[in-house]
Image (cartoon, helix red, strand yellow):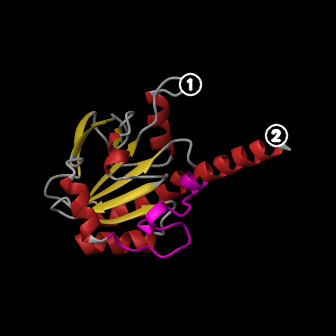
Amino acid sequence: MRRRRYLGALAGVGLSGIAGCLGGDSPGGTDDTAGSSDTAETATESTESAASGDLPLVVDTIEAQGSEAGEVRVPVAGTPTILDLFATWCAPCVAQMESLRTLHDEFGDDVAFVSVTNERLGGGLTMDDIRSWWADHHGDWTVGHDPESELMRAVRANGLPYLVVFDENGTKTWTHRGLASESNIREALEDVR
């Protein structure tokens, strides 16, 4: 009987972890989930995050299709920015790339697109694997690597994919955990363009 309760508890923890990648409900209700309508974060929450000193952050960038090795400041100074947090193992992240490609073609001259993975290299994952994933999914904008997850903590991301839109002043105007619809991302970008 004790073993059954223990296994049940473990299964619950495992499902909670999977829900984060797939876009389950977040504590506090500030992020939207797949299948629900997107809403912007309040300015108060954005101001609190900015006041904490977490942002902007500088992230190492990867030499890959559409991206140069070096560094990028997130959010990009003086430019509306969309931040996409992803991982190569995350199936919804693959699906999100299609919308991001379309929107990059539409907004790329007015909005900085930055995608960042926090995956640690080793254990079978190499930088070439990340580059290959990026090319296979037709990424064509700045891609960064943040193995210490500093950026995820700074934007309070609690699942993948995780999108954040910043205005030209670096204020968070919209966040979304899980697979976001192209129309909702477009609306968030139109609000800062």
Mark seen at residue 74: none
Find out whether residue 31 is within the magenta segment.
yes
Find out whether residue 186 is within the magenta segment.
no
Q: Position of residue 193 (x, y in %)?
A: 22, 70
Q: Nearest the camera: 66 or 37?
A: 37
- Which residue appears at 53% of the width and 52% of the height? 94
Q: Amino acid at mark 2?
A: Arg
Q: Nearer the viewer, mark 1 or mark 2?
A: 2
Magenta stretch in the rendered image:
19-41
Label 2 belongs to which residue?
A: 3
Residue 76 in the figure: left or right of residue 120: left
Q: Quadrant of residue 69?
A: top left
Q: Position of residue 112 (x, y in %)?
A: 25, 56
Q: Quadrant of residue 60?
A: top left
Residue 64 in the figure: left or right of residue 81: right
Crowd rating for badge 2 (residues with CA inside 10 Å; few <14, some 14–19, many 20+): few
